[in-house]
Image: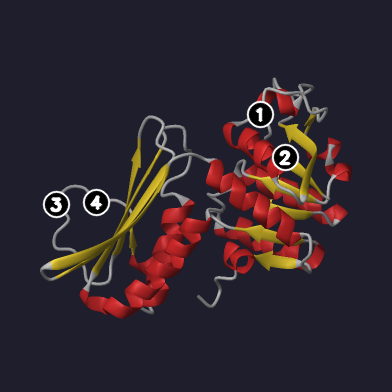
Amino acid sequence: MIKVIVAGAAGRMGKMLCRMVTEHPELELAGAFDAVGGPAVGRDSGELALGIANGVVIGEGLESEIDRGDVIIDFTFHTATLEFARIAAKHGTAMVIGTTGLAAEELAELKSLAESSFPCVHAPNMSVCVNVLFQLVKKTAAILGDDFDIEIIEAHHKMKKDAPSGTALKLGEMAAEGVDRDFLSSLVTERSGIIGERKKGEIGIQSIRAADIVGEHTVMFAGPGERIELSHRAHSREHFAQGAARAAAWVTKQKKGMYTMFDVLGLENF
């Protein structure tokens, strides 16, 4: 069995990860931790996630748990994620990272750490369906070309800290690849006031934050007299956690380096 450590085990996503790891036939929940000083430290992770004690007590920080597992699953916050990666590098422990909002320099350090010290799957979204959507968006953009305007609308719960979502940004990147366009120079994330005519080549992303929306993404390809919309709507966080568990079972068998869910799912050449 592959021994898994779950970061942020007391949070909404952490609890779901503990549950999905427990249900996966190749995985064993061997460790769980929360932030230093967190109120859940010392509690049984099973009682929090499943309502049934499992004997895996939530530790205080990754250092307290690092020797217990083969792979760390982390969906916490970008600054915490990078610190976890530095610790993982010292121990050669594999990682599955679903954290979004990492800056370019943070991503560069993460890649450097992984390539020298441990195998790591990093993806803005671990859902199987969303990763299929990424590839569909790229193919659709390539077929329709520059005559179609590309707009992305994403909606999440009011507690989400980053905007646009990592998934929306990845959708934009895939669309830009499809039309052979530089994504960052094409990206428009806010429109307000007298903005004038839409510039050719823009890729717009608009963000909605409200109530308990788990996650919704729509990519619109709008042309003269018609449009195509590709959408994904998450009904729960369960499929994110299932994808992460699948990635955890896969990544421990890989060499050092950075991987994506395309690698895990065999979608790289889709």
Mark 4 vs 3: CB contact within 8 A: no
Instruction: Please give the residue where the numbered disc 2 appears in the rendered image.
Output: 22
Task: Please identify, in this view, whether the residue under mark 3 or under mark 2 is nearer the observer.
Answer: 2
Instruction: Please give the residue where the numbered disc 4 appears in the rendered image.
Output: 191
Q: Nearer the viewer, residue 242 or 89?
A: 242
Secondary element at image label 3? loop
Task: Please identify, in this view, whether the residue under mark 4 or under mark 2 is nearer the observer.
Answer: 2
Instruction: Please give the residue where the numbered disc 3 appears in the rendered image.
Output: 194
Please name the amino acid that badge 3 sits on: Ile
Relative image position of residue 263 (x, y in whole percent): 62, 68
Mark 1 vs 2: CB contact within 8 A: yes
Residue closest to the far right: 67
Task: Please identify, in this view, whether the residue under mark 1 or under mark 2 is nearer the observer.
Answer: 2
Res. 92 image quadrant? bottom right
Relative image position of residue 251 (x, y in whole percent): 73, 61
The residues bearing labels 3 and 2 have C-alpha atoms spaced at a distance of 54 Å
Which residue is found at the position 35% from the left and 78% from the top? 142
